[in-house]
Amino acid sequence: MPTVTCVMPAYNAEKYITEAIESILNQTYNDFEFIIIDDGSSDNTPNIIEEYANKDGRIVYLANEENKGVSYTRNRGLAAAKGKYIAIMDADDIAHKERFQKQVEYMEQNEDIGVLGAAYFSFAENKDDGKDIIMPAEDKEIKLYALHSSPIANPTAMIRKSVIDENNLRYDEEYDGAEDYEFWQRMTKITKFHNLSEVLMRCRQAEKDEKAYSANFKIMNRALKEIVAEEFYIPLFENPEDNSLAAIRETFRIVSEIPLMILNDDCPFTRSELATAATSQREYLLDTIIKDKEVIV
C-alpha cells in the first residue's frame, strides 16, 4: 500500500492541469498513488489525464459520466484512496517538490495530528504577482480561526486516513464552493490540526461567487450556534445577497458582541479568545463582502 494518496478532481482544467500533474509526479517523496478524477469535462482534460496515466503507473484515472460537482468528486477520491495519508490537490495549483516529504515527516513524528496544512503562495494569472499566506499554526488558534474562515488551505492539506475512516467523513455536497471549510469545521470536533509555516504550494486565486458566500455564512452561523446559548444566538448575514448598509452594520454589531454573549458550558474558547476571533471576522467581512460588493461604510 502507498504511504500517500493524492486526490485531485479536475473539471475543464486543460489550461493548468499539466503543470499540476507534473508538480505531483516530480515530488522528492515517491511512495504515493495519484488519483485524478475527471468530473465530466467538455474540454481536453480527460485526454491529458489519460496520456499521463498511460505513462506513469502511480496515476489512477477515474471519470464521472457527467459533471457531478466538486464534493461528489472529492468523495469518490477519498473512497478509492489506499494510502495512510491523503493529500488534497487542485487541478490549477502547483505543489513544491518537497511538499509530500515534509508533510509525511511531520505526520510521522506527530501522531496526534489528524490534519496538516501549510503556508502557500497565492497568485492570479501572473505567477510572480502574489503573496505568501501564512496560516495559523497551532491547534487552538486554528480552531478559533475556523469560526470565521477556512483554517486549512485545501490544496495544502494532508489528512490521516484513519481519522476519515473511523468517523466516516465525507465532503457535504450541499456546501459546494465552500465544501473544504465545512469539512474542516466538522473535523475540528474530532482531531488536532497543524499548519506548517513553510510555503509548500502555489495556489491560484479562484473567483468568489454568491454560492460560496452563502455557504461560508451558513458554516459560520452553525459554528456560532454551537458555542452560544440558544436564547442569545443571533445569525450573521442571513441573506448574504443583501449588501445594504443596514445589513452590513447589523452583521458587524453581532460580530462585535459575540464575546459578550452567554456561552454554552462546553464552549472551548475564552471570551478573550472570542474577542480575537471577532476582530478577524470583521476583517474577513471587510476583505470579502464589502470590498467585492463595493459597498462603502
Image: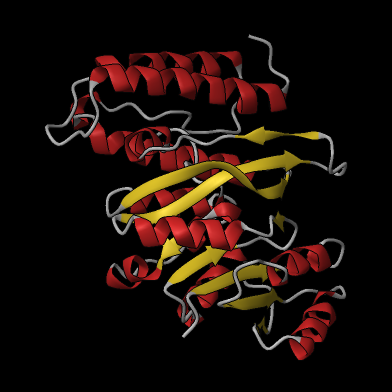
Vertically, is 251 above or below 118? above
* Image side of residue 199 versus residue 123, left or right: left
* Image side of residue 268 versus residue 138, left or right: left
Q: Residue at x 86, y 73 (%)?
A: 43
How are the colours assigned in the image?
A: secondary structure
* Image side of residue 219 versus residue 6, left or right: left
Residue 87, visible in the rendered structure: yes
Closest to the observer, 158 or 292: 158
* Image side of residue 61 versus residue 193, left or right: right
Give residue 269's position: percent from left, percent from top: 24, 29
Give residue 212's position: percent from left, percent from top: 59, 45
Closest to the observer, 250 or 38: 38
Residue 258, visible in the rendered structure: no
| Image quadrant assignment for residue 260 | top left
Q: Residue at x 37, y 48 (%)?
A: 193
| Image quadrant assignment for residue 7 | bottom right
Vertically, is 265 above or below 162? above
Quarter of the C terminus within the rendering: top right
Closest to the observer, 197 or 214: 197
Please give the count of numbered marks on the rendered protein. Answer: 0
